[in-house]
Amino acid sequence: YLRYDGQIRNLRLKKADIVNTIKEVWKEKTTEDEQREDRSSLAEFLRGFLEKQYGERAAQWAYSLVEGCRQHRDDDFISLFLSILTGKVDESVYHGQIRLLSHLLKELIHSDATESGCLTPPELSEALRRAFPLKTEGQIEELVQAAQAQLEATGGSIAYQALFNEDGEGKPGAFIKLVRNQANAEKRKYLTELRTQLCDKDKVEVAELRTAIQSIDPSIDPQTLDGYLSLAFKTPTAQLEQTPPLDTDSVVQRLLAADVRRVGPPQAQP
């Protein structure tokens, strides 16, 4: 997406333009991927997207967009796009975040029995427990407090859909930021447990990683488990059994850079 002979002028895009372009890229790519059996990489898609949008100025836009992303990488949304574009993070992380927030909003709407658009703090707590059954009471309380602080609704009803609003630069409020931060911390803890389960192995085989994941996450279903193994070994699920052992730290790092999360409680419920 940055291949070009000659000099390219930096358009010095405003942050709002960068955010809006990234949103449009994700929207179109998601739509296209739903119609294809094999999903294109973000880099491949971006090149075609910019050529279609800007023609001969596509290279200029590509350079300016990437430079703008680097300048604003303190923004989580922009930083994630750049990390996926450069191959440091798997695209599944973006889609996982979208599914996480969509699942949360659906649960909040479902909990709004009167369809008033508001939930009391106890109702919000209960909805959060249903949406995130693996969270601790402390985590749930943190989320409720973040929601109240964001909407300045201490003790009163919470207009829950407003919790999903973004500012003029596309940044979410404190509540959504905390939801994502908790999810990231939970993933790191999950993978730390996995690394401990693998002991001090320098290399790990597919069967060994399968057993280790099942040990720390006994509720995991076969399809999700195969998906994690495919991500870890960068191999289609149908070819996993023929995959040679890989460096253990590399395997864990690949999972850290993908959409991986605990499926059930650490120990199977009786």
Image: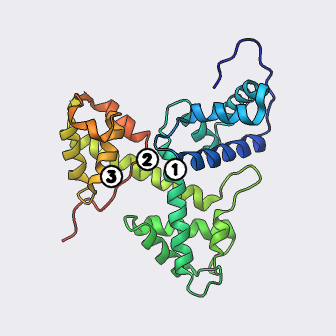
Instruction: State the CA–CA distance, disc 2 to disc 3.
Output: 11 Å
Find residue 95 and name its label: 1
* Mark 2 or mark 1, earlier in chain: 1
Q: Residue at x 22, y 29 (%)?
A: 245
* Mark 3 or mark 1, earlier in chain: 1
Q: Residues within 10 Å of mark 1 (few under 14, many from 20)?
A: few
Amino acid type of the residue tagged 3 in the rendering: Thr
Amino acid type of the residue tagged 1 in the rendering: His
Residue occupied by mark 2: 259
Picture coordinates of residue 91, whole percent (x, y): 50, 41
Secondary element at image label 1: helix
Q: Is residue 125 left or right of residue 270?
A: right
Instruction: State the CA–CA distance, disc 2 to disc 1.
Output: 8 Å
Find residue 224 and name its label: 3
**Contact check, label 2 and label 1, Cβ < 8 Å:** yes
Q: Is residue 22 left or right of residue 143?
A: right
Picture coordinates of residue 19, whole percent (x, y): 71, 44
